[in-house]
Image (spheres, coloured by chain):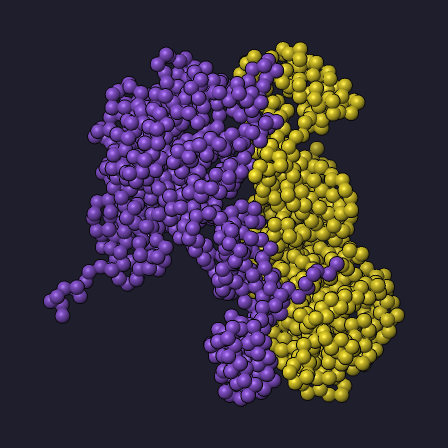
Chain colours: A purple, B yellow
Amino acid sequence: MLPEEGRKRVIIEGVKPEIDAGRFPIKRIIGEETVVEADILADGHDALSCALLYRKQGDDRWTEVPMEPLGNDRWRASFGVHEMGIYYYTVQGWVDHFKSWSRDLAKRLQAGQDLSVDLLIGAEMVEAAGERAAQLDKEWLATFAKTLRAGGAEGARHALSPELARLMSINGERRFITRYDKELKIVVDRERARFGAWYELFPRSCSAVPGRHGTFKDVEERLHYVASMGFDVLYLPPIHPIGTSFRKGRNNTTVVGPDDPGSPWAIGSAQGGHKAIHPELGSLDDFRHLVETAGGYGIELALDIAFQCAPDHPYVSEHPEWFRKRPDGTIQYAENPPKKYQDIYPFDFESEGWRELWEELKSVVQFWVDQGVRIFRIDNPHTKPFPFWEWLISEIKRDCPEAIFLAEAFTRPKALYGLAKRGFTQSYNYFPWRNTKWELTQYLTELTQTEVSEFTGPNLWPNTPDILPEYLQFGGRPAFMARFILAATLGPTYGIYGPAFELCENRPLAPGREEYLDAEKYEIKSWDLDSPDSIWELIAKVNLIRHENPAFQANNNLRFHDVDNDQVIAYSKGSVDRTNQVLVAVNLDPHYKQSGFITLPLEELGIDPNLPYQAHDLLTDARYLWHGTRNYVELNPLTVPAHIFVIRRKVRTEHDFDYYL
Amino acid sequence: MLPEEGRKRVIIEGVKPEIDAGRFPIKRIIGEETVVEADILADGHDALSCALLYRKQGDDRWTEVPMEPLGNDRWRASFGVHEMGIYYYTVQGWVDHFKSWSRDLAKRLQAGQDLSVDLLIGAEMVEAAGERAAQLDKEWLATFAKTLRAGGAEGARHALSPELARLMSINGERRFITRYDKELKIVVDRERARFGAWYELFPRSCSAVPGRHGTFKDVEERLHYVASMGFDVLYLPPIHPIGTSFRKGRNNTTVVGPDDPGSPWAIGSAQGGHKAIHPELGSLDDFRHLVETAGGYGIELALDIAFQCAPDHPYVSEHPEWFRKRPDGTIQYAENPPKKYQDIYPFDFESEGWRELWEELKSVVQFWVDQGVRIFRIDNPHTKPFPFWEWLISEIKRDCPEAIFLAEAFTRPKALYGLAKRGFTQSYNYFPWRNTKWELTQYLTELTQTEVSEFTGPNLWPNTPDILPEYLQFGGRPAFMARFILAATLGPTYGIYGPAFELCENRPLAPGREEYLDAEKYEIKSWDLDSPDSIWELIAKVNLIRHENPAFQANNNLRFHDVDNDQVIAYSKGSVDRTNQVLVAVNLDPHYKQSGFITLPLEELGIDPNLPYQAHDLLTDARYLWHGTRNYVELNPLTVPAHIFVIRRKVRTEHDFDYYL
C-alpha cells in the first residue's frame, strides 16, 4: 500500500537524549540547557534544513531552533527551560532546494559555467518565497528576484549574498517536512532537585535532657547547629505514631522493654497512621511551626514516606482487603525467609481494592504537601509496584511541580534505574560501597557521564541509620573526613545521617556487620555535639565552598584525572559558563600520608600550557603555583585528607607592579 | 488518572534484538536461531516467570518458549525460524507466586521453621491450578494438594518435588501478565541471502570473436568457466537498450564514435526501456533460456536495476511529469556541480505523479521477477527516497519472499544502514578501501559483531567496474590473491567483477584515480581467459573450501586474533554446531614475505591447551602440528599469500597404532 505522502524524503533517527524510545522523560533543572542531536538525512545530494522544536505543556506553539550540521549526517541544537513542569521537544527536517541551489551555484560560478538558466531557477524560488513573505521581506525578495532575472555577474553576486540566504531561510519553501514521530518529554524541577546538602536526624534524640523524648520544639533548637554546618535540607525519619505489637527492642531484638520507643518505620497505632503525628513529638501545629522556622534558616524539611503498617495501624482494621491473609486467618507480615518481620504488614498491591489503596496512599503524600512539605524521601520504593510510583509522582507533581522525591532504592541496578525513570527525582545508590579509586571512578562515571544522568540525580550518602560501611568502621576520623569530602564534592547532592556521622560514630553491631551498634532506629540517643572529635567545622567549610563555587552544583561535569598513586583520587568540575573550575584530590588511605603527580588535561580546563597557573586550596587557603600537566600533591589523613582547589588561569607577574614600566 | 490494571507489577525493557525501538525488522535465514534477551523485573522479592513468544505472520497463535534468568534481571530464550517470510516475536513476564512459595519454603525448611500454614498456602495454589488443568494433570494436582494439606515432612517433600514444579509451571496461576508493548518483526530469507559467491560480467564482452558484440548465447558458453570457479550468482549489468543522445565514448569521454556501445547504465532508447532487452544481446526468450541454463550449473542470475533514464527513454516523452523541467523548457539532467551527466535524466521523486512513478518502477522489478529473476543489484539506491525502497521491497517480497536485494550503497554510513534497515538484503560497503589490518579489523568487527549484523548482510567486493582500488593497482598479482581471499573468507557473501579481477587487470584511468583505464562500461572488451597470470585456480579452490566448510557460511561468527606483525591478519570462524573451525591468516604485504606468531584463544575454540592440535591448510594441503596459544606462520606473497586452516582438535597419538597395546 502506498504511503499517504511518499515525497517526505528526509529520515530522522538516533535522536538523543531519548530514554527507552521516548517511553520516559529526561529531567532538567530550571535554567538548564538540553542539547539535542539527531541523524537527519535524505537521499541524493540535496541540502537539508533541520530544526529543533520545543514547547511547554499546555502551550500549543512550538519554538523553533535551527540545527547545525556536525558532519556524518548528525545535527545539533539546544534550548533552555525556564519554568517548572513538563516540556516537550522534537526535531524536523526538510529538503531545502534553495540551499542546494546556492551551494551548486557557487560551484558553477567557480568553474566559470554559464549561469543564465540557473539564475532563472533561483529567481523562480525567490519569487515564490515573496508570495509567502510579509510586506518588508516581500519587497526585498522582489528586488532580489529582479536582479537574478537580469542575470550576469550582478545577478550571481546577489544570488549568493548572505542577505538573500537569510530571507530565504525565513520565507523559502518548506515542502514535505519530516517531523520525528515522537514528542519527547522533559520534567523540569527547581534547583534543589539537583543541588543540596541533606542532614538526617532523629527528632526524638534532640532533647537537651538525656533520656527525655525529643520534640519538634527541640528540633527547632537544633536548627541553628544544622544551619551553621550549611545544610539545605533537614530530613526526618517517620514522625507518625509507632506500633506496639511486636515492637522491636534495642539493637533490633524481639525483646522489648516498657521504655523502648520502637522503630519509627513501624508506622501506625491506635493514635493514628500516616497522616498522624507521634504524640510525644508534638502536634501538627508544632510540625508546621518547625517547617516555617527551618525555612527561616534556609533549611527545607524532608519527610520520610514509608508505605507499610504496624499491626496496630488503623488501616488494618479499616481496610483488611489491603493486606494478604493467611489460611489461618492472620495477616501476612513482612518476610525475607527465613527472617520474619512481624512488626510490619506490607500492603498487598495485588488486592482487589488496589484502586482505593493507591488513592489513599496518594492522599498521604498530598496531606504532607498541604502542611508545607515539598521533599519526600521514599522508604524502600522497590517493594511497591513500578506503575504505582509512576502514577503517584506524576499526580503529585501535576499540582505541585516543586515536589522532590528521593528513592531509597538500595536494590538491583535495573530496579533502581527503573524507579528513577518513572519519576523519582533522586536516588540513593551504591556510593556507600564504592571506596577504592577504581570503584569510585567507574561508578561516578556511570552516574554522571552516561544516559543515567539524563533521568536520575544521585544523592550520595556515606552513612544512613541502616548503613555503617566497613571503611568508616576501621578508618577512624580520617575516614569520615575523606568520605564526607568525596560525597560533598563528587555530586551536587549528598547527605549524612547525623550527629552519628560528624561525631565519627563507628561501632558496628557485630564484626562483619555494616549496621550500627545501639542503633538510633531502636532507641533515643543523646549526642555530645561538642565532642572534640566532631568534624562539623570541616562540614561547614565544605558546604560553604559548595555554595560559593557553581562548579559543585552540577552533576554531568565530573572528570577524573590520572594520579600515579592508587590511594589518591583526583577529579575536576567546571561551571557551565567556564568561570569556575575546581579540582579535588582526596587521600583514600585513612592511615598513611600519600602523595603523587596529578595529570591534568590543560586544554580542556582552558589553561595555557606555557603559562603557570594557580591552585588555590579552599580548605587551607594555601596557594600553589603550578605549571604544565603534571603537578605534585601530598595529603596527610591526620590533618586534612584532601585538597579542594579552585584553579585560576591568571597569576600575577612582573607586569602587575607599578615599577615594571 | 488510574491505569486500567494497576496490578501488572512486572516491567520489561532493554529487549534485544530490537532495531530503532522496533521500527525496523531484524533479518534471519531459514534455520537460523534468534536469541532474545530482556530485562524483566518486578518490585519486591517475588519470583518471576518469563516467556518468549513468536509466530509467523498470518498465524494467530504464539509459540511460547520459557526464558532463563541470566542474573541481574536479564532473561534469555531463543527460537528458530523455518519458513521464508515475516515472523514476529515479543516477551512477557508475570509474578509467579507458586515459584516464590517453593523458593521460600525451601529456606524455611532449611531453617527448621514450622511449615504448617505455609503448606496450606501451597495447597490452595495447587487446588486452584487443579481447577484449570486437564484431566490427567487435574488428578495429579489433587493428590499433591491432599499431601500438602496433610502437612509434615511428607507434605514438605512433595511440595518441593520437581514433578509438582512442572505441573504448576503448566497449570499455575498467571495473573497480571505484562506483555512487552511491541511485536518485533523478522524478515526470513533463503540461504542465498547470506551465503554466496557473486561474479559480475558484461555480456557484450563474452563473444569468442574479438570485437563482436556478445549475446546471451555467448554468456551461456561462458557459464562453464564461471561454474568451474565455483560461483553461485552471475550478476549482469543492465541489459536494456542503451540511449544514444549524449552517449559516452571510451573512457567516459563526451566524444563518441559510431561504434561506441555506450554505458549500459544509460538506459532506454527508441527500442524500449527498463522492461526491454538491448537487441544485440538477444531476445527475451534468449534471456529466459540463459536463466534456465545457468540454473543447471547451480548458478542464479542477478540483474541490475538502475532507476534512471537516457534522454531517449520512452518514459521521457510518455511521462514528462516524472522529470524536473528547467525554465528553458529542457529536462534537468543529472549533475554533481560543476560536473554534468547529460546522458542521464534522474526521476523527480517530488513529482506530482509520484504515485504512478512508484507503481511503474515496481512493475519493472515485477517484470523481471516474472522472467525468473530473484536477485537484484540496485544501482545507486541512495539517490532515490528511503520510503520508496521500503515500500518497493516489501511489496515485491510479499508475493516473492525469495527475492534478494543488494544495495550499491557507496555512500555515507547512515544512508547505507538506513537503506539496509528499510529492506535491502545486502549492501556493498567500504571493503574496497579497507586494506590495512587495523582498518579491516575495525570495519569487519562493525559489520559482523554489532547491531548492524542484525539488519544487513555485507557483500564484499574487492573491485567493481567503477572501482579499481589503489591497493590492486600497485600490488600486482599477490595483491589480487590477498584481496580475493580476504573477501571470500571474511564474509559469507562476496563478489568480483571479472574477468578483470581474475586476470589481475590493474591499469588506472590516471595516476591517483581509482577507475579502470579503458573501462568496460564504455567499450566491448575481449579477455584472454587463458592468461597464465589468471588466479582462477585459487578462486575455484577457495569457493570449494567455502562450500565444504560451514564456518564460512555465517556472518556473525568472525573473530580476529592477535598477530605480532601488522602485515599479517588472522581471524577464525566457527560453525554454529562447533564441528567446523577455520582459521585464516593473510599476508597483507604484496611485496615481501612476512611472518609472525598468532595468538589463539584456545578455550573459545574448544581446544585443550595441554594437547597438540592440527592446523590443516586447505590451500596447500600442508598439515601443521600446533601446541598452545602462540604459533608461527610465514607467508610468501609470490606463492600463496594466505593460509586457510581447518583447526582439528584431535590428532593421532601412539594410541592409534595397533602395536601400542
**What residue lies at 64% left-to-right and 71% top-to-bottom?**
B467
Q: Horizontal placement of A77 versus A373: left or right?
A: right
Q: In the rendering, at what x and y percent does residue B655 appear? A: 68, 37
Q: Quadrant of residue A511?
A: top left
Up/down of A57 relative to B505, above or below: above
Q: A220 or A339, which lies in front?
A: A220
Q: In the rendering, at what x and y percent does residue B250 appear? A: 69, 83
Q: Is residue B111 visible?
A: yes
Q: A70 or A241, which lies in front?
A: A241
Q: Horizontal placement of A343 versus B24: left or right?
A: left
Q: In the rendering, at what x and y percent does residue A223 appear? A: 27, 33
Q: A380 or B67, which lies in front?
A: A380
**What residue lies at 67% left-to-right and 81% top-to-bottom?**
B342
Q: In the rendering, at what x and y percent does residue A400 appear? A: 44, 41
The N terminus of chain A sits in image quarter: bottom right
Q: Horizontal placement of B524 versus A261: left or right?
A: right
Q: A469 or B346, which lies in front?
A: B346
Up/down of B403 relative to A224, above or below: below
**What residue lies at 67% left-to-right and 79% top-to-bottom?**
B325
The C terminus of chain A sits in image quarter: bottom left
Q: Horizontal placement of A531 versus A483: left or right?
A: left
Q: How many marks?
A: 0
**What residue lies at 40% left-to-right and 43% top-to-bottom?**
A193
Q: Is residue B647 visible?
A: no
Q: Quadrant of residue B461?
A: bottom right
